[in-house]
Amino acid sequence: MSLPNEVLDFLRSLRDHNINTSTLSDEDRVMIAKKFREFNEKGISYDLREMDHWVELAKPDWSYTVYTYIMYAAEITRYAYQK
C-alpha cells in the first residue's frame, strides 16, 4: 500500500520547503498535527509503515526530532479517529 497523494504532497512540502532544521517551532508542530487531523477527518487513510519508510528516506535532511514528531502526530491522530 502506498501513501495517498495528499499525504505524500504534504510530506514533500515539509521536506522541500518548510522544515529542514534540527528543531520544530510551536507553529510547525501545530501545523503538522492539524494536517494529520484534517486527513483523518476527510477519511484519508495512510499506512504508518509506509509513511515511516518514506520519512526515513527524507531523514538525512531532518533531525531525529522532526522525524519523530511527524510520526508521532500521524499515529496519535489516526488512533484518535479510530476510537
Image (tube, rainbow, N blue to C red):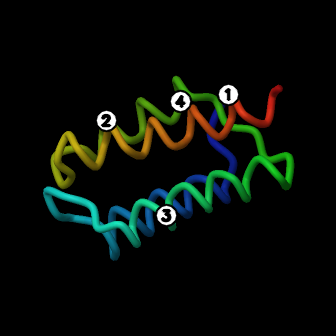
Q: Which label's residue is closer to the chain start, 3 or 4? A: 3
Residue 50, numbered circle: 4
User: What residue is drawn where x is 49% and y is 64%?
Assistant: 30
Kindly report which numbered mark, 2 or 1, lies closer to the viewer in this rendering: 2
C-beta proximity under 8 Å, tags 4 and 2? no
Q: List the residue tagged with mark 3.
A: 30
Kindly report which numbered mark, 3 or 4, lies closer to the viewer in this rendering: 3
Does 20 sit left or right of 32 as displayed? Answer: left
Q: Quadrant of residue 82?
A: top right
Q: Mark 4 Cα within 10 Å, few/some/many (few <14, many 20+)?
A: few
Residue 42, numbered circle: none
Q: Quadrant of residue 17?
A: bottom left
| Circle 3: residue type | Val
Q: Mark 3 Cα within 10 Å, few/some/many (few <14, many 20+)?
A: few
| Circle 1: residue type | Met
| Circle 4: residue type | Glu
Q: Quadrant of the C terminus?
A: top right
Q: Which label's residue is closer to the chain start, 2 or 1? A: 1
Q: List the residue tagged with mark 1.
A: 1
Q: List the residue tagged with mark 2.
A: 56
Q: Quadrant of residue 10?
A: bottom right
Does 43 sit above or below residue 1? Answer: below
Q: Position of residue 65 (x, y in %)?
A: 23, 44
Q: Which label's residue is closer to the chain start, 3 or 1? A: 1
Q: CA distance from mark 2 to mark 1?
A: 17 Å
C-beta proximity under 8 Å, tags 1 and 4? yes
Q: Position of residue 45 (x, y in %)?
A: 75, 39
Q: CA distance from mark 1 to mark 4?
A: 7 Å
